[in-house]
Amino acid sequence: MLVHICCAVDSHYFLQKLQADYPNEKLTGFFYDPNIHPYSEYYLRLLDVKRSCRMLGIDLIEGEYDTEAWLEAVRGLENEPEKGARCAVCFDRRFEVSARKAAELGEKHFTSTLLTSPKKSLRQLQHAGDALAEKFGIGFVAPDYRKASGTQEQNILAKKDALYRQDYCGCLFGLTMQREQQQKLADELFVPISGQIQPESIEARIEIYEKRWELEEQNLPHRIVKQRFLNWRLKMGLLRVRKEVVPAHFLPYSTLKGEYTRGKIEYATGELHHMNRDEVKFITLETYNRLADTDYATVRELIFSPPRFEKEVRIRTDLRLDLYDLSTVLVVEEIPSNKIEILSQSTVYSDVKEVLIAPLSN
């Protein structure tokens, strides 16, 4: 039986139920989810599915990440609500590819872990699966593992085996609508031009789960814990001196009351140079290099290839700024002596991130 897999939380429970109910069937997992955006989130979910299948002794096949074809298939349905017409097209497409793959492999049946997702319509999935089963001359298996406290058991099992729990279905459109309803920043879609890994970004989670994989292979004790913290994202930042754009690097947690300010340097306290408005501060690239133990030749080089986020945060402490100081701090090659204009769009917000604790003592 070919089992289409959407994510580890759904599949881990679903596959174990199938193993119990169909002991004579060889189950093969098929991860086909071009609807998942961005690609880093797709990779993270695939990584967790691989771990789950390894734990359960199930072979896994990865389908094509043909996201452009998926986007074309749902064109015009971008604003449809969850469980609406866009989702129906999405299910049909993934089911059709899965059914075709099952037929190619000579499987007699196919099914999908989407059946156990509490966010999906079981009737909608059953209808799509039956139609495709008839088209390809195979059977569609549609057990209802949600009933009899199934969803609760699934959640208990996911927590026990420390599975990655995503908090949105997968697609770009569902994510943006969900974040708008929650009045939250869709920070999953933020990737700085520098490529720096931001706190609680998908890339940060990938680092954690790849490291977890290594620790498990070495049989080293560890734990992933959650931590509430103040997060930050810079959407845009620009410095102009006498109306000429000057390369400037914004240190993490730099914020303004609005999106625009102007003024001039008024005084210095040690290596910090203070603008006369909006608590803006400047340091030179020379100071930055000394505090960060780096050797950037230009600010432009720093902008496009900064050190790790955590290292930059420590620079604020080294500058004797308060732990809760959200003042804008700009790194420049020379402290401006003329009129300064700053455009900046940044957001600070309460958030929760995962932290890998290792090694643990027994």
Image (spheres, grey):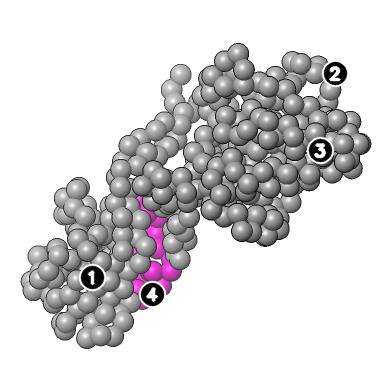
Disc on the earlier residue, 1 or 3? 3
Q: Position of residue 151 (x, y in %)?
A: 57, 22
Number of the front mark, 3 or 4? 3
* Closer to us: 194 or 72: 72
Q: Position of residue 80 (x, y in %)?
A: 56, 49
Image-quadrant location for residue 20: top right
Q: Position of residue 24 (x, y in %)?
A: 85, 18
Q: Which residue does the image show at 63% across and 46% down from the upper left? A: 85
* Membership of 307 in magenta stretch: yes
Disc on the earlier residue, 3 or 2? 2
Q: Is residue 272 visible?
A: no
Residue range highlighted in magenta: 292-310
Disc on the earlier residue, 4 or 1? 1
Callout 4 touching callout 1 (CB < 8 Å):
no
* Residue type at the position of mark 3: Ala
Tell me the residue that label 4 is attached to. 300
- At mark 3, the secondary structure is helix
Estimate the spatial distance between the alpha carbons at disc 1 and disc 2, rounded to whole Å. Answer: 67 Å
Tell me the residue that label 1 is attached to. 260
Q: Which mark is residue 24?
A: 2
Q: Residues within 10 Å of mark 1 (few under 14, many from 20)?
A: some
Estimate the spatial distance between the alpha carbons at disc 3 and disc 4, rounded to whole Å. Answer: 57 Å
Q: Residue furthest top?
A: 148
Q: Which residue does the image show at 38% across and 69% down from the upper left? A: 302
Quarter of the image with the N terminus is top right
